[in-house]
Image (tube, rainbow, N blue to C red):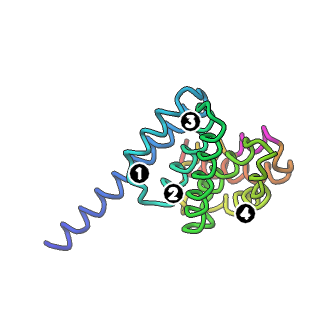
């Protein structure tokens, strides 16, 4: 009986974590589309317990995104420095996580180059391309992976061969899932 309760509790916690991640992704997407939502995204993540490297990476991204809407240049720089520290910690916890790497890649791609904080673009792109075949094992939603491929294509950060390989994997995922 105790093991049944333990299994039920574990499954409930995993479901709650998954639901929380879905909400975080949706909030992130809204903040990307509308910079005025950056503060709400940041406030939302203040209330979310950063229990996984992925949630920690979103929290880091919220710090960088908040820099878009603050006025004071020193505050902007402070936000970007907070982002950098938090993101590095998330990366160190799960160095092969596609979603964490994508968050860093997308933030660094959009940072002003004069800050000299965009030094991981090639590394993150390489990890994403290499690991995209394990999307299911890494618990990354295939639709989010399509968003990653779209971003990589739109920014020109990947070669046509790399994009074709990733799209092929996503197409096979879609066939397996029936989506």
Q: From the viewer's perspective, is the residue at label 4 or at label 3 nearer?
A: 3
Identify the magenta region: 149-155
Please state the horizontal and vertical placement of residue 25, each as a whole percent of the image: 51, 42
Badge 2 marks a residue whose secondary structure is loop
Q: CB under 8 Å between callouts 2 and 1? A: yes
Name the residue located 57 percent from the left edge and 52 percent from the top edge: 82
Quadrant of the drawing holding the N terminus: bottom left
Query: Label 1 belongs to which residue?
Result: 18
Badge 1 marks a residue whose secondary structure is helix
User: Are there few (<14), some (14-19), or many (20+) residues within 10 Å of tag 3?
Assistant: few
Quadrant of the drawing holding the C terminus: top right
Looking at the picture, tell me which residue is in the foreground, 63 or 95: 63
> How many numbered discs sit on the rendered protein?
4
Q: CB under 8 Å between callouts 4 and 3? A: no
Please state the horizontal and vertical placement of residue 32, each as a whole percent of the image: 60, 34
Q: CB under 8 Å between callouts 2 and 4? A: no
Mark 3–mark 2 distance (CA, rounded to whole Å): 18 Å
Query: Label 2 belongs to which residue?
Result: 139
Circle nearer the N terminus (3, 1): 1
Mark 1–mark 4 distance (CA, rounded to whole Å): 24 Å
Query: Label 3 belongs to which residue?
Result: 29
Please state the horizontal and vertical placement of residue 132, each as a whole percent of the image: 67, 58
Circle nearer the N terminus (2, 1): 1
Residue at the left extreme, as displayed: 1
Q: CB under 8 Å between callouts 3 and 1? A: no
User: Are there few (<14), some (14-19), or many (20+) residues within 10 Å of tag 4?
Assistant: some
């Amino acid at each position: 009986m105790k093991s049944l309760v333990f299994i039920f509790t574990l499954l409930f916690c995993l479901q709650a974590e998954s639901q929380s991640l879905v909400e975080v992704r949706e909030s992130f997407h809204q903040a990307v589309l509308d910079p005025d939502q950056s503060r709400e995204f940041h406030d939302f993540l203040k209330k979310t317990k950063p229990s996984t490297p992925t949630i920690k990476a979103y929290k880091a991204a919220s710090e960088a995104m908040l820099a878009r809407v603050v006025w004071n240049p020193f505050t902007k720089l402070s936000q970007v420095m907070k982002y950098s520290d938090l993101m590095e910690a998330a990366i160190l916890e799960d160095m092969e996580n596609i979603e964490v790497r994508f968050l860093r890649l997308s933030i660094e791609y959009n940072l002003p180059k004069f800050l000299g904080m965009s030094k991981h673009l090639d590394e993150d792109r390489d990890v994403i391309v290499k690991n995209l075949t394990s999307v299911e094992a890494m618990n990354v939603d295939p639709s989010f992976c399509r968003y990653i491929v779209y971003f990589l294509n739109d920014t020109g950060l990947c070669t046509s061969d790399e994009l074709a390989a990733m799209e092929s994997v996503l197409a096979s995922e879609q066939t397996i899932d029936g989506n």
